Amino acid sequence: MKINISNSGLFLTVLAMAMLGIMSLSQAQVVTQPLSGVSTTAKVYTYIHMLSQTQKKDIRYIIIKASNGDVKSCFDACDVCYLANKGYAQSGSQLRCNNCGKTFVIDELGTQGVGGCWPGLLPHTTDAQNVIINISDLIGGDKYYPTKAVTAVQDEPVREMALSFNWFIKSDLLTITMDNASERNILIFNISGKLFKTLASSANQVSVDVSDLTAGVYLLSVEDHGRTASQTIVINR
């Protein structure tokens, strides 16, 4: 697939992204999950927080619907048992700590702050289609999760992104897989917010040649009908 970036198209893209507040990693950003996928069955998501080119933290969080239909969100960890890094499991209308066995009523999630064995508080908002979580709030919970080494991305398996997008890099090809076919914009920035590549595609799988990008950390953004999924990627040489 050939990537074309016209001056006018680039300006409109940059303007649109600036309005969405995702132009730079230094600005406020969000991750979104579709409301249609939220149910009374707990789902655990992972936000990959890159500390450097060689270190990261996998920040796990839970989204679930309470018995009255309210959306609840929390970290998959607490202030007491987080060192065990075991998280929670659902047991009917409760979450159970996999380390100490204590249970918590799902309907009451979000009513507690920090301290004690209670799923870590993670704020969210909703609109007509999405659950919206500030990346700054997610990073605020990185104390719960261990630092991990970043392995060679070329050999890593596909990893789940927000909005159920997946990606992997192999042989200088970035492959992005979506769960369905839909018109989308795909953009790649460096960590300073400079736009390097952009393309529009309606395919459910897209391959992008990244051989011209130097080694480092980049931001991959996928825009789908007003929803934006952003994920950091690492290119090694």
Image (cartoon, grey):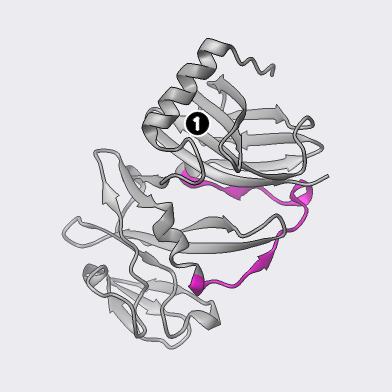
Mark 1 Cα shell of 10 Å, populated few (<14), some (14-19), many (≥20): few
Who is closer to the viewer here, 89 or 17?
17
Q: In this picture, is 229 found above or below 80?
A: above
Q: Quarter holding the C terminus? A: top right
Which residue is drawn at the image coordinates 46% and 17% (left, top)? 12
Question: In the rendered image, which quarter is residue 129 located in?
Answer: top left
> Does the magenta portion include 190?
no
Span colored in magenta: 143-162
Who is closer to the viewer here, 67 or 79?
79
> Does the magenta portion include 151?
yes
Q: Which residue is mark 1?
A: 180
Give x and y (percent) for residue 125.
27, 50
- Left or right placement of residue 41 versus residue 173 in this view: left
Q: In this picture, is 138 found above or below 173?
A: below
Question: In the rendered image, which quarter is residue 149 located in?
Answer: bottom right
Which residue is drawn at the image coordinates 50% and 67% (left, top)? 142
Q: Amino acid at mark 1?
A: Asn
Give x and y (percent) for residue 39.
31, 54
Which residue is drawn at the image coordinates 69% and 19% (left, top)? 1
Who is closer to the viewer here, 53 or 203?
53
Give x and y (percent) for residue 16.
41, 25
Q: In this picture, is 51 found above or below 125?
A: below
Q: Is residue 183 visible?
A: no
Q: In this picture, is 203 found above or below 168?
A: above
Q: Is residue 164 visible?
A: yes
Q: Which element type, helix, strand or loop, lies under badge 1?
A: loop
- Left or right placement of residue 185 versus residue 155 in this view: left
Give x and y (percent) for residue 223.
46, 31
